[in-house]
Image (cartoon, grey):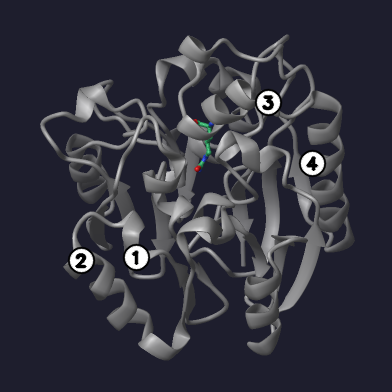
Amino acid sequence: MLKLHIKNETSRLRAVVLGTAESNGPIPKIEDTYDPKSQQHIKAGTYPKESDMIKEMEAVAQVLKKYDVTVYRPDIITDYNQIFSRDIAFVIEDKFVKANILPDRDKEYQAIQHVIKQIPKENVIVLPEDCHIEGGDVMPWNDYIFIGTYSGEDYPDYITARTNTKAVDAIRAIFPNKTVKSFELRKSNTNPKENALHLDCCFQPVGKDKAIIHKNGFLIEEEYQWLVDFFGKDNVFEITKDEMYNMNSNIFSISEDVVISEKNFTRLNTWLREQGITVEEVPYAEIAKQEGLLRCSTLPLIRD
Ligand SMILES: NC(=O)NCCC[C@H](N)C(=O)O
């Protein structure tokens, strides 16, 4: 049986599900896409090739192997996108919560049944269907759970809005000992530079007490400011609109002092090293074209 344990985003990683780019399927039709960045690349003829994305994910697998992390991979569903395993479920403490993901992506959960079977049944939580939530919006941070959401009345119009108020309330009820703090995110179905698809597309804690953040990803300035004050101005690395677009906030922590990051994130990687963090660089610019990066591709099961 798997002894799940996740308290935060950066404690030493021991076991993780890493998505797969195998049998990712043909280039989607514009009407079948569910994020504006993929759309943009389909129109420009620059949508990523499966073989390139497989290489990128293999580089991540190699780093995880180097750090002796146990890596689970999804079963392969023919011609189906299974790169972003982060969103399909999430672990908080010893609970595995099935995410109620966008219907276009709902088969992804079935492909990790071999992992779920190893979790005691009483620790697997299935939320009511009207609680929409994706793991990219959920961040356990010690006594807190940070959740990205969108509560506008036009929620149903946004295919980019993935976590609703009902889900935030449900998480609050399941974890009464945690402070659940939600953040309204900026959404656009058409402009990736104005779209924080998930909380991890505009914010992520790193190290022991630091964070990466993009102000414009937050709809409410006070909520952005709350995070800056929480971590302290000097501990926060502010990223630009283009850096958010390139997914700089979506690196992945193996521990408080080791992260996996994209090799072109020069400014961020320099800052991380200045903080004493070892940066394991991988190529991930092709996968980034689908509006997800390293945090999005990983579902941590056990951290110290
Ligand atoms: N946590 C994340 O931000 N995941 C990225 C998911 C990207 C995928 N194209 C989607 O729209 O669901």
Please tell me whether mark 3 or mark 2 is closer to you in this view.
2
Q: Secondary structure at mark 4?
A: helix
Q: Which mark is residue 57?
A: 4
Q: Residue at 68% across / 25% down in the picture?
A: 114
Rendering coords of residue 77 (x, y %) = 70, 13
Which residue is label 1 attached to?
A: 215
**Among numbered discs 1 and 3, the one appearing first in the sequence:** 3
The residue that appears at 37% across and 27% down in the rendered structure is: 100
Q: Secondary structure at mark 1?
A: helix
Q: Amino acid at mark 3?
A: His
> Real-space Cα distance between discs 2 and 1?
8 Å
Residue 178: percent from the left, percent from the top?
A: 28, 62
Q: Please identify the quarter of the rendering in which residue 20 is found.
A: top right
Can residue 95 be seen here? The reply is: no
Are the residues flagged by discs 3 and 2 in contact, CB closer than 8 Å? Answer: no
Q: CA distance from mark 3 to mark 2?
A: 42 Å
Image quarter of the N terminus? top right
The amino acid at mark 1 is Lys
Report, in whole angstroms, how far the alpha carbon at label 4 lies from the one at label 3: 20 Å
Q: Earlier in the sequence, mark 1 or mark 4?
A: 4
* Discs 1/3, front: 1
State which tag comes first along the sequence, 3 or 2.
Answer: 3
Q: Crowding at label 1, few (<14), some or many (≥20) Cα neighbours within 10 Å?
A: some
- Position of 237 compared to 148: left or right? right
How far apart are the two marked residues, 1 and 4, measured between alpha carbons?
A: 29 Å
Q: CA distance from mark 2 to mark 4?
A: 35 Å
Cβ atoms at labels 2 and 1 below 8 Å apart: yes
* Mark 2 or mark 1, earlier in chain: 1
Residue labelled with disc 2: 221
Three-letter amino acid code at the position of disc 4: Met
Determine which residue is flagged by label 3.
Answer: 114
Callout 2: SS: helix
